[in-house]
Image (cartoon, rainbow, N blue to C red):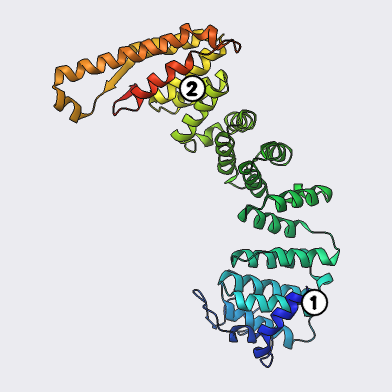
Amino acid sequence: MRVLLQSIRKGRASTSGIPWPVRRLSISSEARNLRLDTKPGRGSSFSANPPQPTFRLRFEQAQSDKNVVRILELCQELKQAGPPSQDDLSLAYRHLVSILAHYGLWTQLYATVNELIELIGLNHIDDLLWATILEGFIRCDRSTDVIYSLILSTGNKIGPQTITALFRAAILESNLSQSILLLQVATASDLLSQIPKLLLIQLADSLAGQAQLKLAIDLVRSFVVPIKETDHPDCVASLISLLRTCVNRSDPQSALYCYSYLTNNHADLIEDLFDDGLMIELLSLSSRHILPDLALNVLSQLVRSRRKLEITHLLPSIIALSRAGNRMSEVVEILVRIGKDLVVVAEESELIGVGEEEGEGQQNEKREEIIKILSKLILNSTDLSNPSRPSKLTSATPKVDRLLSSSNRIIIS
């Protein structure tokens, strides 16, 4: 803390003669879209016989207008009204730090933090002011480590607003050790239930992306679900992002949990949010880990959303069902549908190059070859369900992959 104060005092030396708080704008810095409107607004003391609003309301109005000059004027008025109380100082500095962070005025923000530490004192900075300072550092793209050290030096308990800001910083920095440490602090202080669900889902997504899948799902299960209508509208989209992370990490348990919750509780919201890439990844996951129910559920969802079923959807499903060993009836149904409705679409250039009749013949041959390979997968299902015997799937799958890698697409209408 001494190093922080000394380094900031050097930056304040050239401005010490300027009255508080106007001296902050005397430090050279590039402001972004500053609102410098000094006209009296609604509720201003310059209005004709207005009902005199409190300083809190006037600060909030200036903050909503993003008017930095008006906030500085209110700070000056507050000082001239008499010795400000601790609450008044916290109010003024909270809005001042927030507006400086909004415009990216890092030099002024840094000096202001030093000043409020001296005037208010570390032990008297409340939860909301600490959180505002942390958010200011985050918005200016600065590390929050020094502020976290100052918070710990007070020996006071960390409040919900402060730990929320600390979690946000840890997520943005992908700081796994900091995230786990803050989770321990929040758990010991019973603060997790007071943190917004959207942030908890983002934290779980960050943990899952760093291989902490079990911890991520435990966090969601304990403090996020069920997601209610009163929660942030982006919670479902963030949970889908967590599902995508679990699928990319190829973890069947966490992916199944997220997918099951989303389809059972938010089916009406996820139809447009589940893109085709995520569907294919889910089907690939089902084939790798022998999850036939997941494969069928994804196919059903594709049918309900009226999406065209391509071979990239059907082949992983058939593999998952065949490897399960006891789901051959579903495999037969899929193959029957393929035999009836499979349409081979050739590129126009191919038909022109080889002639229309020969081009159609090549497509029919490819169609028959794919059907034969898929049929072999069924015949070999007994071998696939027995882990002690070598799988014949490894020899059949590359043949299908070579067919699928060509320019022709196979579509189920």
How dense is the environment of label 2, judged by Cα within 10 Å: few (below 14), some, or many (20 and up)? few
Image quadrant containing the N terminus: bottom right
Q: Is residue 391 left or right of residue 217?
A: left
Q: Residue furthest right?
A: 155
Q: Residue 174: percent from the left, percent from the top?
A: 63, 52
In the rendered structure, find residue 120 and report the number of the disc placed on it: 1
Q: Is residue 49 left or right of residue 407?
A: right
Q: Residue 347: percent from the left, percent from the top?
A: 23, 29
User: Of callouts 2 and 1, which one flags the residue occurring earlier in the amino acid sequence?
Assistant: 1
Decide if residue 255 is in sight here. yes
Residue at image point 84% right, 70% down? 123
Dot 2: what SS? helix
Give the labeled residue for mark 2: 300
* Residue 345 position (above or below residue 381): below
Residue at image point 61% right, 85% down? 46
For the residue marked with disc 2, what is the amino acid? Ser
